[in-house]
Amino acid sequence: MNGFPSRRAVLLAGIAAALSAPAGSAWSQAYPSKPITLIVPWPAGGSTDRHLRTLAEIASKDLGQQIVVENKPGGGGTLGPGTMALTAKPDGYTISQFPMGLLRVPHMQKVPWNPINAFSFIIGVSGYTFGLTVRADSPYKTFNEYIEAARKQPGQINYGSTGVGSSPHLLMEEVSTNAKVQLTHVPFKGNADLQQALLGGHVMAQSDATGWDKFVDSGQMRLLVTFGEKRTKRWPEVPTAKDLGYNVVSSSPYGLVGPKGMDPAVIKTLHDAFKKAMDDPRHIALLDQLNQDAWYRTGDEYRQWAIDTFAKDKALIERLGLAAK
C-alpha cells in the first residue's frame, strides 16, 4: 500500500458527499447557475430597450447572475418572443418581453405559436405613454392640423410606427377611423430606425412610445398629442387624443414571459427578483423619465389579463378591417 486512498475510495466518498449535500448547493445546480438571456424584440436605443436594460441590470444583482439583453426586432415585436416560444428550452435561461402585438398579430395573420399557451407568464411590469411627433420644422403645429391635412389630401399624409399590429399602428388606425380620414402607414422595425427616418424627413410623423422624449425636449421634434387617460406630467401642455374628441386611449401594458412549461419555482425566482428591481429607486426614476407607470401583475394575473385582452382585441382588429381573411 502506498498510503494514499484508492481511486475507487475517492470516487465513493465523492458520491456520498454529493448525496448528502443540502439542496441549493453548487452540486444541485441551484437556479440560476449561468447568465440569463432577456430578449427585447425592438432595436437597441428605444424606450423599451432603455427600460428593460436597466431593470435587468438591477434584477441581476439579486439573482447573482448577469442578465444579457438580446435585441431581436421584427414582426411588430413578435419575432423575438415568437422564436423563443418555438425554440428555447423552458429552463429559465431565455425570457422575453411580451408586447401587445403578440395578442393582436394572430388575429391579423397565421402565426406558428399560440399567444397564451406558448408562454409561461412571469410578471407584469409597465405600460407606455404613446404620442405622435413631427419634426420641429413641420407645417403641422397641432394634431388637428395634421388630421385636417389628411382630410384635404386623402392617402397623402403619412406616419411611421414600430410595425404592423403594434399599438402605435393600431391607435392611429383607430384615430383615422374615428376622424374619417385616410392616413398612410409606414412600418419600421423599432423606435431607433423610426426616429432616424423622421429626423431625416423620410416620414411626416411618427406614432410611438416615449423614445422621442429627448428629441422633443431638445427642440428637434414637436409633440402634437399623447394617448393616455390624462395629460403627461412631463408635457402637460400637450393634449390627449381624448381631450381632442378622438376617443382613443392606449397604454399597452407589457411584462416578461418564458417558453411554456417552465418550473413554477424558477418562475417564482424570476418574479421575485424582477419585483424587487421594480421597487428599486433607480427603476422608479427611469419610469418617471420615460413617463411610464408601473403595471405590476403576478404571473397568474398577467396570464389572465392576456387571455381577456386577446379576446377583446379580436373585436378591435375586426372593426378596423385588419382581421385575417
Image (spheres, rainbow, N blue to C red):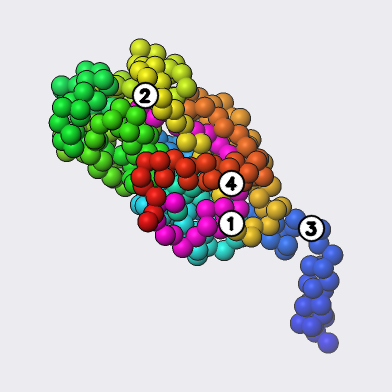
**Residue bounds of the magenta highlight:** 107-131
Q: What residue is at 35 percent from the left and 12 percent from the top?
A: 237
Residue ID for mark 4: 307
Residue ID for mark 3: 23
Q: Earlier in the sequence, mark 1 or mark 3?
A: 3
> Residue 246 bears which disc, if any?
2
Q: Nearer the viewer, mark 4 or mark 2?
A: 2
Answer whether labels 3 and 2 touch (C-beta < 8 Å): no
Q: CA distance from mark 1 to mark 3?
A: 31 Å
Q: CA distance from mark 2 to mark 1?
A: 35 Å
Compared to residue 191, the image places residue 84 above or below, namely below
Bin the neighbour count of mark 1 within 10 Å (Cα to Cα): few under 14, some 14-19, many 20 and up: some
Horizontal and vertical percent for residue 62? 63, 41
Q: Earlier in the sequence, mark 4 or mark 2?
A: 2
> Residue 117 bears which disc, if any?
1
Q: Nearer the viewer, residue 64 or 264?
A: 264
Q: Quadrant of the N terminus?
A: bottom right
Q: CA distance from mark 3 to mark 2?
A: 58 Å
Residue type, label 1: Asn
Answer whether labels 4 and 3 touch (C-beta < 8 Å): no
Does residue 215 appear left or right of residue 127 in this picture? left
Does residue 209 appear left or right of residue 315 in this picture? left
Bin the neighbour count of mark 2 within 10 Å (Cα to Cα): few under 14, some 14-19, many 20 and up: some
Residue type, label 4: Ile
Bin the neighbour count of mark 3 within 10 Å (Cα to Cα): few under 14, some 14-19, many 20 and up: few
